[in-house]
Image (cartoon, rainbow, N blue to C red):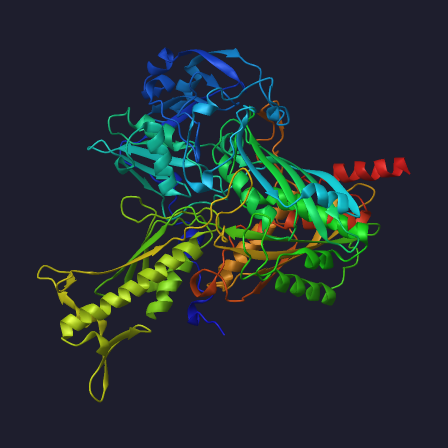
Amino acid sequence: MFKMNNLSRAPNLYGLEKVTGKAVYTTDITLPYMLYACLKRSPLPHALIKKVDTSRATSLSGVVAVITAEDVPKGLHGRGLLDTPILARGKVRYIGEPVVAVAAESFDIAFAACELVDVEYEPLTPLFDFKEALLEEPPTVVHEDLSRYKRLKSKLYRVALTPNKPNVSALQKIRFGDVEEAFKQADFIITNTYTTQAVQHAQLEPTSIIAKQEPDGSLTIYTSGQTPFRTRKEISDALEIPEQKIRVIVPKHVGGGFGNRGAAVYEPIVAALALKTQGRPVKLVLSRLEDLMYTTTRHQAEIKLSDAVTKDGRIIGRVMSIVYNGGAYSVAGNVVVRNAIYAISSVYNIPNFKADIYRVYTNQVQGGAFRGFGSTQIYWAIESQMNEIAQRLNIDPLELRLKNILKDSDVSCIGEKIHSDTMRLCINTLKKLLDENPKPKSPIDGWVVGRGVAIAKHQCDITYPSVALIRLNEDLTIDLYIGATDIGQGTFTGLAQIVAKEFNIPLSKVRVISSDTLLTPISPGSSGSRQLVQLGNAVLAAVKDLKGQIVEAASKILSKPKDKISFSNGKLKVESENTTEEIPLETLFTAGPMGGAYIEQTGLLLGRGFFYEDLAEIDPETGQASKPRVALEYTPICAAVDLAVDPESGSIKVLNIKVIADVGRAVNPALVEGQLKGGAWMGFSTSLFEELVIEEGQIFNGTFMDYLIASISETPNIETTILESGIGPGPFGSRSVGELGVLPIAPAIGNGVKDAIGVRVTSLPITPEKVFWLLKNRSTLK
């Protein structure tokens, strides 16, 4: 039985700081002589900038710097596709796009200065309909220079190019088998269109950034970000200065993210201001309204899905057409179409497949990363469709899934060979759990109870190498240097536990030095559920290296052969002819003449660890993988939802959510449970409550008075069953879980509604109004 000693349910390393109010976030940081920034934003969705008059703003007392696109470098930035200017240059492409930035002695002065800026616009025809954006001759081209923009060469960002469709920023195709023949051979065909809404991340800490130019001309950036090295790269691209002249620091505490902090939308603006303020730091903190209205959203999507099915329940062919509404800029558009591939291909064994996955430009705030990035939309469609097939065949929905899932040694529709798959274990565990817990009775007279199920997998893919450094100190504490960020999920605690276990020391003796591009090694940051698995492997490698250095140092200092020295379980032992002597680790250190200590000849004991695997490239024209492994691995999850529906009003009350996941090994079960429950809750809230209302590019519910989020009184009981097969790719056989919980919840709820009242909601969110009208229309048709 796997054990993490007494550390397995260790509390969050920094939890006490948070609950006592002592945690310091970027928004709390104050530097000497600091200035405060405010942004002048576009009121129009699409327009030429004819003239910008900043004279009244610059003459206002207390204003130190005012910048427009003409005052900053012309570099573009982005993740994969570089299409975003620091400030709107030549034209604006969405309501709220920053046009002018001001730095002043106080925020009030900066705000007043922004009000004094006069911008003359010439309105252009905006593009809002993402179906029109797919046209070869659309009414508007959002980016006329798309063909000239730089695209990064990483295989993760490769996409098919579509010069005949000028608003398509990214396209990925899948071509596998003979789809046309499969549809001819099918006993029946089911076709549906599913849509998802834009939603906001609503993280607790607003976007907060501080930038300062150092005396040597370099820049130091403090940001409430998720990915410091990626942020540094985007600032470098935008300002056209070397990455090595930029230091990005993410404080120990970040107030959530869920993908919203994965792109450097505002950091280049604050950095550009800092270059104009003679060394005085500049701070930008977005208001809650700005955070909700003018930062990236989850992509709206439309998924058309047709399945060719045999009468015994085999899906022999599938055709999908997917369009993600990307908004005005790419941000991480190449990644969203890539992530769709994982969701499409990793669960079901379908021998004939065709998919076209588009991301298009429109004149609204840009879509970006959101927990389950690109996959939640896919699972909403596929898992809803699976229940439609099961109903058509009159078979149990879980049995249908068992009949069609991939298993070890199968080859998926992208040519990936399946390995270490435990989805069947998860489904069978869920079946047993549901058999033991029949549908509950209705809590309200007249309401009808339904039960829905759904399954999903989340990939652990690789974008960056992971590097870790571990230093043993003379007091036998250990410093762990990592480029990771902890945005609330407990990453630092999990990584520190690995070190503590390997050296058999209390968790309190591990100190984490993190998220500083000057001091810490490269890391993917909090993105894609990668850190504990990939950086954890680097930490284990660093531990192994440090243990080897300890033996090497002991051999030299004690004048003993290395083969007579061992270090394990935190103990240094030396073998003699008849005895084994335990040597205190302190023996290895020599006291310095002026304090401190050192290791003779080497100076210090510093372990280095590296983790990276060169996985397959996906052909953007065919979706076929160049190697058998596309992702490091996939974590499986199943969900069941019991709910009640009022057939009179369409109101829905979720009674309970059950989640089962095979996490490989739970390094810290409390943290794993928190991630699964938090993800499931987010899936619940975004399925039933949340939607950014966007009409003609304008967001109409940009406050928490109008943007609905599930409250504690509406939240059902969420039960988690954590399976531990021990066959994951991470430390001790662990798997990634950060985004897993959100994936199956929306379709499970939708399937529960269908089970209760017999109507299929195909668009998110599932609101009482939609259910009411579906029931009314059904009654009218009868």
Figure check: 148 above or below 749: above
The reply to whether residue 702 is in sight is: yes
Q: Which of 428 and 58 is in front in this view?
A: 428
The reply to whether residue 68 is in sight is: no
- Is 177 on the left or on the right of 778, as rendered? left
Q: Where is residue 348 in the image (x, y as percent from the top left)?
A: 64, 52
Q: Which of 27 and 644 is in front in this view?
A: 644
Q: Where is residue 322 in the image (x, y as percent from the top left)?
A: 62, 36
What residue appears at the point 47 percent right and 38 percent down from the top-left corner? Answer: 158
- Is 442 on the left or on the right of 298, as rendered? right
Quadrant housing residue 39: top left
Which residue lies most toward the left here? 593
Q: Where is residue 6 in the image (x, y as percent from the top left)?
A: 43, 71
Which residue lies most toward the bottom here? 578
Figure check: 486 above or below 440: above
Q: Nearer the viewer, residue 734 or 52?
A: 734
- Is 759 on the left or on the right of 327, as rendered? right
Q: Where is residue 278 in the image (x, y as percent from the top left)?
A: 24, 26
What residue appears at the point 35 percent right and 49 percent down from the top-left corner? Answer: 483
Quadrant housing residue 305: top right
Quadrant housing residue 557: bottom left
